[in-house]
Amino acid sequence: QVQVAESGGGHAQPGGSLRLSCYASGTIFSIYSMDWFRQGPGKQRELIATIPTGGFINVRDSLKGRFTASRDGAIHTAYLQMNALKPEDTAVYYCRVRNQNYSGSIMDYWGQGTQVTVSS
């Protein structure tokens, strides 16, 4: 079992910045990727960034230039740096950890999410 914990959410004013962290722990065999999602009020959950192991980090096109994703594989932690925040960035931000077991199967584990509110 893998536990996923997000942190760093909170309130920011428009134009401000926040940095989210996602920490994976537990029975980690091989992390395939750590990914960021968000779900705004009344909206569907959407993919923000994918951070595959040994691959290219991909950030949603509409967020490039403001959001940056990164990862420290040594400590199973992913980050989401959010700059120039807008009210429409208000959402619950989730981290998904894709853990690949010894047989090659991938299982997804989700955190409980961290609330980000952008308002003046």
Image: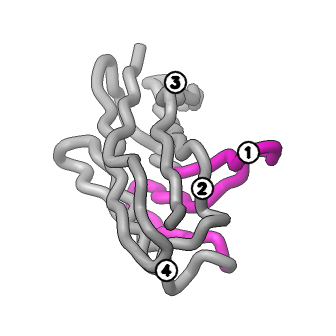
Q: Where's residue 29, x and y in %?
A: 35, 28
Tag 2 and tag 1, C-beta contact below 8 Å: yes
Camera-nearest label, 3 or 2: 2
Tag 3 and tag 2, C-beta contact below 8 Å: no
Q: Circle 3 sits on which residue?
A: 103
Residue extending furthest toward the left: 74
User: What span is in magenta?
Assistant: 36-61
Tell me what residue is drawn at x 53 percent, y 46 percent: 93
Camera-nearest label, 2 or 4: 2
- Looking at the figure, which quarter contains the N terminus? top left
Q: Is residue 81 above or below residue 79?
A: below
CA gap, disc 4 and disc 1: 21 Å
Identify the amino acid type marked 4: Arg
CA gap, disc 2 and disc 1: 8 Å
Counting other residues with Cα less than 10 Å from the Cα at mark 1, is it few (<14), some (14-19), or many (20 or more)?
few
Q: Is residue 91 above or below residue 87?
A: above
Mark 4, secondary structure of its residue:
loop
Camera-nearest label, 4 or 1: 1
CA gap, disc 1 and disc 3: 38 Å
CA gap, disc 3 and disc 2: 39 Å
Q: Circle 1 sits on which residue?
A: 41
Camera-nearest label, 1 or 3: 1
Q: Circle 2 sits on which residue?
A: 90
Q: Mark 2 or 1 closer to N-term? A: 1
Q: Where's residue 98, x and y in %?
A: 51, 37
